[in-house]
Image (cartoon, rainbow, N blue to C red):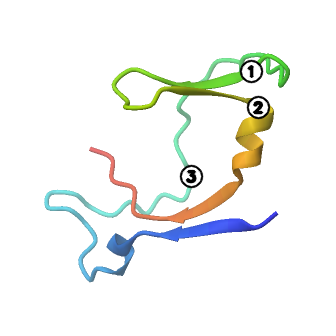
């Protein structure tokens, strides 16, 4: 399977840190949930995109896997 690469033009700027922010030297991503992961059943799992979107849609797990993978290179700013 081919992995699509997406490179943000922001990563090519000389000054990539927004005003008032500092670069993190941490190499460990923070724990965002300390609870046990929910059970996963690929037969019943669905990804639904709805709400304030022009074209709501829903995908099964199989359909989502068919979309393919992307590798994204971008700055992540947490405020």
Where residue 27 appears, as percent x and y from the top left, is 54, 59
Q: Residue furthest front?
A: 55
Q: Give above or below for 8 relative to 56.
A: below
The spot of residue 53 in percent (x, y) is 37, 30
Q: CA distance from mark 1 to mark 3?
A: 29 Å
| Quadrant location, the C terminus | top left
Query: Tag on residue 76?
Result: none
Hey, which quadrant is residue 36 in on the image?
Answer: top right
If you read the primary sequence from the N terminus, does the residue marked by circle 1 or circle 2 appear first?
Answer: 1
Residue at horizontal 23 percent and vertical 77 percent from the top: 15
Instruction: Name the N-terminal-most of marks 1 and 3.
Output: 3
13 in relation to 69, above or below = below
Q: For this rendering, which residue is in front, 77 or 42?
A: 42
Position in image of residue 58 (x %, y %): 61, 25
Neighbours of disc 3 within 10 Å: few (<14), some (14-19), many (20+): few
Q: Which residue is mark 3?
A: 28
> Which is nearer the eye, 16 or 66?
66
For the residue carrying disc 1, how many other residues have a C-alpha within 10 Å: few (<14), some (14-19), or many (20+)? few
Asked if the residues shown at circle 1 and circle 2 are in contact, with their CB atoms under 8 angstroms apart, the answer is: yes
Which quadrant: the N terminus? bottom right
User: Label 1: which residue?
Assistant: 45
For image coordinates 39% across by 63% down, the residue present is 75
Q: Which residue is mark 2?
A: 61
Q: Secondary structure at mark 1?
A: loop
User: Disc 3 or 2, which lies upstream in sequence?
Assistant: 3
Select label 3 or label 2 by which is in front.
Answer: 2
Front-most of residues 11 and 19 = 11
- Residue 50 shown left or right of residue 20 in the figure: right
Relative to 37, say whether 54 is above or below. below
Image location of residue 35, percent across then percent down: 64, 18
Task: State the image quarter where residue 11 is shown.
Answer: bottom left
């Amino acid at each position: 399977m081919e992995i699509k690469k997406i490179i943000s033009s922001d990563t090519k700027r000389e000054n990539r840190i927004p005003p008032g922010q500092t670069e993190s030297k941490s190499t460990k991503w923070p724990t965002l949930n300390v609870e046990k992961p929910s059970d996963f059943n690929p037969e019943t799992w669905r990804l639904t995109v709805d709400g304030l979107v022009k074209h709501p849609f829903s995908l099964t797990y199989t359909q989502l896997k068919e979309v393919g993978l992307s590798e994204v290179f971008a700055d992540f700013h947490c405020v």
